[in-house]
Image (spheres, rainbow, N blue to C red):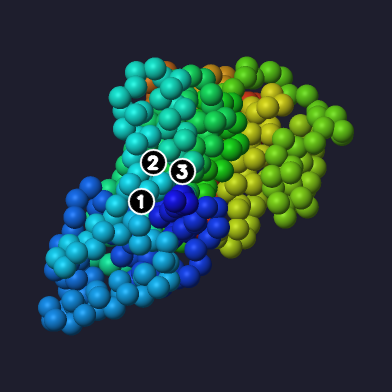
Amino acid sequence: MEQHTLDVHLLGGFRITLNGQPLTSINQSRQQSLLAYLMLHADSAQSRQYVAFCFWPDSSEVRAYANLRYLLHHLRRAGPTLERYLEITQSTLQWCQLAPFRLDVAEYKTLVTRANETTDSDEVCKLLIQAANLYQGDLLPGCYEDWIIPVRERLSQTHVQLLQVLVDQLEAQGKYQIAIDYATRLRSYDPFRETSYRRLMELYETAGDRAAALRVYHDCLSVLERELGVEPGPETRAVYERIVNSTSSPVTVAQPVPPGIAAVSDERLVGRREEWQKLQNTWQAVIQDRPHLMLIRGEGGIGKTRLAEEVVIWANQRGHLTVRTRAYPAEGQLAYAPVVGWLRADVYRDKLRTLDRIWLVELVRLLPELLSANSDLPLLTPLTDQGATTAAVRSIGSCCVQCGAAAVGPDRRSAMGRSRDD
């Protein structure tokens, strides 16, 4: 008797082939759902009464039975070769696995089980990669039957755990690029899970690609703000700040960048070539002792922060000193909080001690800790008038000039509490 090989895919959608040829006649969602149900419960016979209730819970028993008979009749007509796989009695239904048959869900579960039972790390990675590549999407995403929801959710949770373990294994073996590929897949699979973004950021950082790590954070920020109206949590922000403030190479004396050197991320800043060129030109003026203020303006979500981050990374890679700060809405009316953040950076700490006394007196208004090393300095009143503000700004400028560092500040959305004089 002629042997037929049936190949069924339920992950990512329903696809069925017989001897390599698609069975397009099984194109009704209820037909596909019934076949999936029987295949996933092939280990035991299913009561016709229970199946009828699962598929038509709101119908009477008589009507549900009639609907099931009608569905089976049309299923047989649509795929006559399926007869050998269906064992139908007056009271039960069962998918028979005696004939050659392949089901992606069954293969996926087998690979996961084998990986859990294996102690060899290379073999674990091999099995998990096979399982991850087999998982083309959630179980029948277009099916909304009640019975499939818990089955789909269990498979989904298994897949998330699988990817997490796989990424850890690959990182432990030093295979960072492959780990990044699967961490990216995990992030795409559940774009609202912050842990996935943090994991991907850390992998990029370990691989030495800080710019990519920062882009992942901005992707997270954009998705959460657009879809959920929230910002990343403190753990995600902490990873972001650590990456931003980390130094990948020793800081050296800044030298003018030769005209032929391109920006590190030139090709990545799609649609921002003109802005990037202006920033580079301004920077060339700065390192030639012509201080400038660079202000990046625009609507929210168009990539202002991303552009600023690229400038910082570009400058650090060329040996320039940079400091950065941020302002948060929770800081309320602390108008000079970003400036205080600048001045408390490691770059400025030693330089503050060398400032003239006239400037130190003004800076104490913002940095009272200076009194611990300069107890003879008077503690002036807060910045409440134009004269005091002007003096403080001049002292800040003097500090910046002596240090020779570039400062990057917050975007306007974060600094809603600023005074009109800052």
Disc nearer the start of the sequence (3/2): 2
Q: Residues within 10 Å of mark 1 (few under 14, many from 20)?
A: few
Any part of residue 306 in sight = yes
User: Which mark is nearer the camera, 3 or 2?
Assistant: 2
Q: x%, y% of residue 112? A: 35, 35
Disc nearer the start of the sequence (2/1): 2
What is the three-letter code of the residue carrying label 2? Answer: Glu
In the rendered view, tell whether residue 204 sits above or below residue 192.
above
What is the three-letter code of the residue carrying label 1? Answer: Ala
What is the three-letter code of the residue carrying label 3? Answer: Leu
Q: Secondary structure at mark 2?
A: helix
Q: Residues within 10 Å of mark 2 (few under 14, many from 20)?
A: some
Of residue 223 and residue 242, the one placed in the foreground of this image is 223
Q: Residues within 10 Å of mark 3 (few under 14, many from 20)?
A: some
Q: x%, y% of residue 210? A: 58, 32
In the displayed structure image, the side of residue 350 where residue 268 appears, left or right: right
- In the rendered image, the residue lying farthest to the front is 1
Residue lying at 78% horizontally and 52% vertically, measured from the top left: 274
Numbered marks: total: 3
- Which label number is shown at residue 165? none
Q: Are marks 1 and 3 in contact (CB under 8 Å)?
A: no
Q: x%, y% of residue 91? A: 14, 65
Of residue 235 and residue 283, the one placed in the foreground of this image is 235
The residue that label 2 is drawn on is 107
The residue that label 3 is drawn on is 134
Residue lying at 71% horizontally and 19% vertically, measured from the top left: 253
In the rendered view, tell whether residue 136 sits above or below residue 51.
above
Q: Are marks 3 and 2 in contact (CB under 8 Å)?
A: yes
The residue that label 1 is drawn on is 330
Q: Secondary structure at mark 1?
A: helix
